[in-house]
Amino acid sequence: MKKLLALVMTLTLFMGLAIPVTAIEGDGLNVIVNDAVVAMDTPAQVWNQVTYVSYWPVVQALYPDATAVWENDRAVITATGLQMEIRPGLKYLVANGRYLYLPGGVRTGNGNLMVPVRTLAAALGANVAWDPIGNNVVLTAGTGPITSGSVAYQEDVVYWLSHIINAEAGNQPLDGKIAVGNVVLNRVASSRFPNTVYEVIFQRGQFTPVSNGSIKLTPNAESVIAAKLCLDGANTVGNALYFINPRYSPNSWAARNRPYVATIGAHAFYA
């Protein structure tokens, strides 16, 4: 099975669908799972200070009953209590319906899919630590895989968050969609704004899609994904509380009065 997936991944890489790993190999980096060194089919990689590992040996070590198949350009992993999908090039993986953000994307090394070890551990319900003396990444099994999305996500929150993301940034890149969701959730957490997603969105005079009715449009698939990524901690604009489109609002109140954070796609964000 592993060789089959590696072959398919090699073909996928050749076709230009995957992002190759251009990081440095971990210098003698070991991956230890439940006190046993795991034989990695591809050495661990350090990419922008994030440690990437080949997912399959780690999954097998934690879930010996796991199986993996290649379906619709992605690896589909099944084990007791776990259903996980990893697709090369995407900025997230899906585990039990939960969307976990990968800023550097899913990568490949020697034909094998590689993901950040901490994100993989979160999906598998494992604890992860760094042993600097032995130069080891140490994982220990937890009580089971990540809680399902049906439990973790509130339906009404996903509904309204995805609707505002779509209305404001439906044509923007994924990171821009996430950023809009971050602004809404940052406002919920701030004492200066209402304390629910619905109330933040419908606060008078705050979001144009509420007044022009575009908030009612059915969100596209990536807007729904972005909402779930936000709810699982994805953040591309820190503590930003405002955003504008400089093309239409070049002299907005936020631009004149609030600290600039970043520009993603068509939007500028301010704290």
Image (cartoon, rainbow, N blue to C red):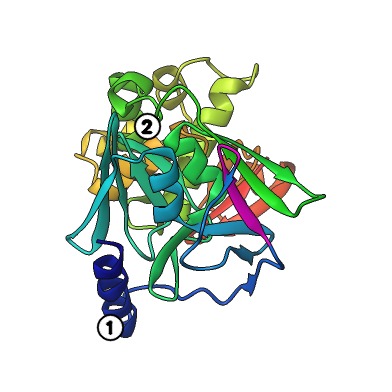
**Compared to 180, does 194 lie above or below?**
above
Residue 19, horizontal then vertical, whole percent: 43, 73
Depth check: give the residue in front, 47 or 4: 4
Residue reaching furthest to the right = 133
**Dot 2 crowding, Cα within 10 Å, few <14, some 14–19, many 20+:** many
- Secondary structure of the residue carrying tag 1 is loop
In the rendered view, does 4 fall on the left or right side of 269?
A: left
Going by the numbered disc 1, the residue's amino acid type is Met
Residue 174, horizontal then vertical, whole percent: 41, 54
Label of residue 15 in the image: 1
Residue under the image location 51 percent in, 40 percent down: 121
- Secondary structure of the residue carrying tag 2 is helix
Residue 8, horizontal then vertical, whole percent: 25, 73
Q: Is residue 64 magenta?
A: no
In the rendered view, does 32 fall on the left or right side of 148?
A: right
**Dot 1 crowding, Cα within 10 Å, few <14, some 14–19, many 20+:** few
Q: How many marks?
A: 2
Residue 208 seen in this snapshot: no
Residue under the image location 29 percent in, 69 percent down: 3
Between discs 1 and 2, the one toward the N terminus? 1
Q: CA distance from mark 1 to mark 2?
A: 35 Å
Residue 202, horizontal then vertical, whole percent: 40, 23
Residue linked to disc 2: 161
Q: Is residue 31 magenta?
A: yes
Q: Which residues are magenta?
A: 29-35
Depth check: give the residue in front, 188 or 138: 138
Depth check: give the residue in front, 156 or 116: 116
Label of residue 165 in the image: none
Which quadrant: the N terminus?
bottom left
**Compared to 62, does 221 lie above or below?**
below
Residue 91 seen in this snapshot: yes
